[in-house]
Structures are given as structure tokens and as C-alpha cells.
Image: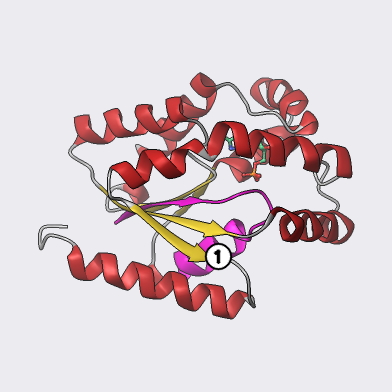
Amino acid sequence: MYIVFLGAPGVGKGTQCRRTSEKYALPHVSTGDIIRAAISANTPLGQEFTRYVDSGELVPDQMVVEMVAERLREDDCGGGCLLDGFPRTVAQAEALEQSFAAQGRRLAGVIEIAASEDELRRRLIERGEKEGRSDDTPETIAARLHVYQSETAPLIEFYRQRKLLHQVDGIGTPDEVFARISATIDGFAADAPVSD
Ligand code: AMP
């Protein structure tokens, strides 16, 4: 089962994906984590990523699309995975759609975790204080929320048109949100063709 998680920075996608990954035994593919790992390893690609991540901008589509394609070719993703933070632009969503069509893979659904912008800003500032992520500073947070609205929010409509969108309320305790996500995924499993 392939599932895309969509949602603004700070909505709790990472936490919820980790729990979903454990419960449903699906690999968690987070482009943010892959990018941060390349940056910490100081690879040539990582050095290029730094300026985008630190300014809250998106890494160019082509680089991310190739990175994800490579990750999806690994054996553990053969039966499904959770995509966290990808796609983030319509161009990335189209690239994913084309590669899935070519490989005979099918998206089971897209889960959008939703919260208000005030709540997101509050959570991001709190995470910046706790975890010290270099891109959780007030200026970068504002830039990332803006990029989300302009580049990523159009994917909500993109997936709604394809009847893949499932919206989940992201307000509540992590347990409450996870219960909503689990109920949504159990619904996909019930709908899925037997061959899946
Ligand atoms: P995240 O942990 O998902 O919030 O990602 C952290 C940063 O990595 C983002 O602000 C972007 O700079 C970069 N990034 C992660 N995923 C993508 C993507 N799909 N496309 C472009 N940039 C990305």
C-alpha cells in the first residue's frame, strides 16, 4: 500500500508517519529526513541542499524526484511505503503519477493532516526550541508556511480530483490524530483490490 501524507510544516506529519509505519509495517520515506541526512554527511549534494533548507525554500523538483525514484527502487518499497513530504509541488505529483503508472504501482490514498496556521506556527516555534532544527527559526518558519500555501496546497485539489484525498483533523493529542489516521487507512485496506 502506497500512501502520501500531505500537510503543512509543523502539522505532525513526521510523528504520525513514524507511528503509521510501525503499525502497518510500511517503510517511512521522508524527503526531509533524506535531505537532512545528506546535509549532515556533508556530501556534495548535501552541500547544495543546505541553502534551500536553511532559507525555507524547496529543493528543485528534479533533484527530489530523482532522489525519491532511487529510494522507491529499493526492495523494501516493493510492496508499499509512506511518502512523507513528497510530493510537494504539482510537478512532483505528476512525476510520481507517471512513474507509478509506468511501474504498475497504485496510490492507495493521500492523507492530508490539517491545522490552522496559528497552531502550526506555535508548534514549529516549540519544536525549534526543543529540537534545535536549523530551519525552525521564526523567519524560516514564515517562509516555509508561505511556500506550503503557494506550492504544496494546490496538491489538495490535485488529489481531490483524482478521488484520492482524505482529510484528517490534525488538532488534538497525537493519539487522537493517530486514531483518525488509522481509521482512514483501514478504510483504504477495505476498498483495495484483492491483488494489492
Ligand atoms: P520537511 O522535514 O519535510 O519539512 O523538509 C525540510 C526541508 O527539506 C524543506 O523545507 C525543503 O527545503 C526540503 N524538502 C523536503 N522535501 C522536499 C520536497 N519534496 N521538495 C522540495 N524540497 C523538499
Q: Nearer the viewer, residue 163 or 53?
A: 163
> On screen, 63 above or below 93?
above
Within 10 angstroms of label 1, few (less than 14), some, or many (20 or more) residues? many
Q: In the displayed structure, would residue 7 be above or below residue 73?
A: below
Is 192 magenta? The answer is no
- Residue at point 68%, 20% (across, down): 44
Rendered residue at 45%/44% (across/down): 156
Magenta segment:
1-22
Q: Is residue 25 visible?
A: yes
- Residue 31 spot, x, y in % from top left: 56, 40
Q: Which residue is at a point 71% across and 53% down the rendered structure image?
A: 117
Residue 74 visible here: no
Q: In this image, 113 relative to 165: left or right?
A: right
User: Residue 185 in the image: x percent, y percent?
Assistant: 35, 67
Residue 123 vs 132, above or below: the answer is below
Residue 179 percent coordinates (x, y): 48, 78
Give the structural element (helix, strand or loop) at label 1. helix
Q: What is the x, y in percent for residue 2?
A: 33, 52
In the displayed structure, 128 sits above or below 71; it is below
Q: Quadrant of the N terminus?
A: bottom left
Total marks in image: 1
Name the residue carrying label 1: 16
Amino acid type at circle 1 is: Gln
